[in-house]
Amino acid sequence: MGEKLAKGGLSFRESVDQMVDHAIEIMDLEPGMGEALKSCASVLQVSFPVEIDGRAETFTGWRATHSDHRLPSKGGIRYAVQVDQDEVEALAALMTYKCAIVDVPFGGSKGGLMLDPTRYTPNQLEAITRRFARELINKGYLSPAKNVPAPDMGTGPREMGWMVDTYRQLFPDDINYMGAITGKPVEHGGVRGRNEATGRGVQYALREFFRNADEVRRAGLEGDLGGKRVVVQGLGNVGYHAAHFLSREDDCRIIAVIERDGAVVNEEGLDIDALRDHLAANGGVKGFHGGTYAENGSKILELDCEILIPAALEGVIHTDNAPRIKAKLIAEAANGPVTYEADEILRQRGVEIIPDAYCNAGGVIVSYFEWIRNLAHVRFGRLDKRFHESRGRHIISAIELASGAEVPDWIRSELVRGADEFDLVRSGLDDTMRLAFQEIIEKRRTNERIHDYRMAAYVIAIEKIARSYRDIGY
């Protein structure tokens, strides 16, 4: 099978392997460990027919398990015409490293089905999805204990709901069936906050970056997130939530959004919610009245800004455009948006990159929370929410008795509010992203052979995985 090349050279899988090889060189691992870490444990390819408009149509899909040093293995399933085995294996490897970086105890896996989901009706997609799920289940690539899929490009809670229901029908006696899939609808075992998780994680990663003044200065920036000019490439689920939260909560100016039909630019800042509504209604950004339309969207990647967030496909920043990128900081919300060669060009130019293996880990972090919730059979906050509300009221009473003054309503409302599931999920995601980035910064500071966040993140991941391999044997 031919490998898809980004402009300028290596395929996505080759880029991931090159980055891992570089990290292994830095670490001086024992002979053979590097190859053990890089090899994909198993790959399943399935082809199956589904009746579409009265005729049989055959679909091909893959599920790769890169590592099962921790179980279950975890990773999304994407529906796209460009899916192939090479891409699925590369994404599975990236999931292994991603989980290790953020201390989520999963192995890495990934799946894909070669189709354009927009060409099919909901009923047809349901039939295709349920058949694909049965193929994965029957081959041992979908279960709460061994391999747990999640949404990815082209899929969402709806598809995950179909898949988990298919598993339930095949295994009606498995009380943990809800844990076979994450990213499900909230009404069917999903966790609140999962849909926004990856974009929210990008926001938390940027917040943690700007909490570290030395790192901000290293990038040639100053101050906090407030007022920073941001360009977002891709206004799908990840790009939308990252842009929405950064503009609404951190006072960033989203000056450009790039989509398939071009880009829209407004130096004063775009209304992200209005733009998303326009995109949903018209299928593109052209015609949006809140900014200036540019037909050549890829050129807008080179727009002058402080932060660039590529949030769509891999390989959009390559050797052709890397010398002209003006952003001082790139936050990789997509998987592999910067090629290996472009990464080197940007590093030499002093552009700091928050790498995909860390930056977009919010989805798998909250998937971990959802999996735990499904196995525990109780929603987060159910046992202690009212207890903390009662304690808050006692604290207010004590303050008022001691001071003789009434506590203001805005303080009262915060103190007496017990955390619900949404609060706890966001808190857990924030804490995980903070601690992981602090570890990445520390690794970069203390190892003179590491010169960027990407290598620091990969070295951290490989150290953890290699330690596990040594403990369990390989």
Image (cartoon, grey):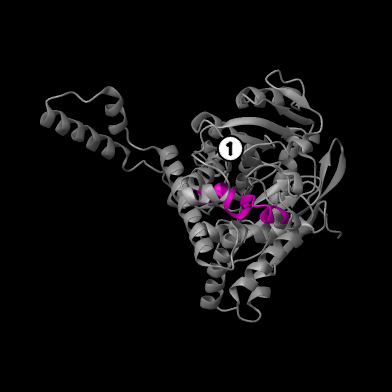
Q: Quadrant of residue 237?
A: top right
Residue 413 in percent (x, y) is at 30, 27
Q: Is residue 266 left or right of residue 466?
A: right
| The one of 461 and 216 positioned closer to us in this rendering | 216
Locate the N terminus and report the quarter of the image it occupies: bottom right
Q: Residue furthest top?
A: 289
Tell me which segment is drawn in magenta: 345-370
Residue for point 74% across, 54% down: 342
Q: How many marks?
A: 1
Q: Is residue 385 magenta?
A: no
Which secondary structure class fits the magenta region best? helix
Q: Can residue 141 be seen in this snapshot?
A: no
| The one of 161 and 431 positioned closer to us in this rendering | 431
Q: Can residue 301 be seen in this snapshot?
A: yes
Q: Report crowding for label 1: few under 14, some 14 to 19, many 20 or more residues within 10 A (C-alpha).
A: many
Residue for point 70% across, 55% down: 343
Residue, disc 1: 242
Residue 81 in percent (x, y) is at 81, 45
408 w.r.t. 69: above or below = above
SS category of the residue bearing label 1: helix
372 w.r.t. 225: above or below = below
210 w.r.t. 461: above or below = above
Q: Is residue 92 left or right of residue 473?
A: right
Q: Amino acid at mark 1?
A: Ala
Residue 241 in percent (x, y) is at 58, 35
Residue 210 in percent (x, y) is at 50, 44
Locate the C terminus and report the quarter of the image it occupies: bottom right
| The one of 330 and 152 positioned closer to us in this rendering | 330
Q: Is residue 415 left or right of residue 17?
A: left
Q: Quadrant of residue 15?
A: bottom right
Residue for point 63% across, 51% down: 356
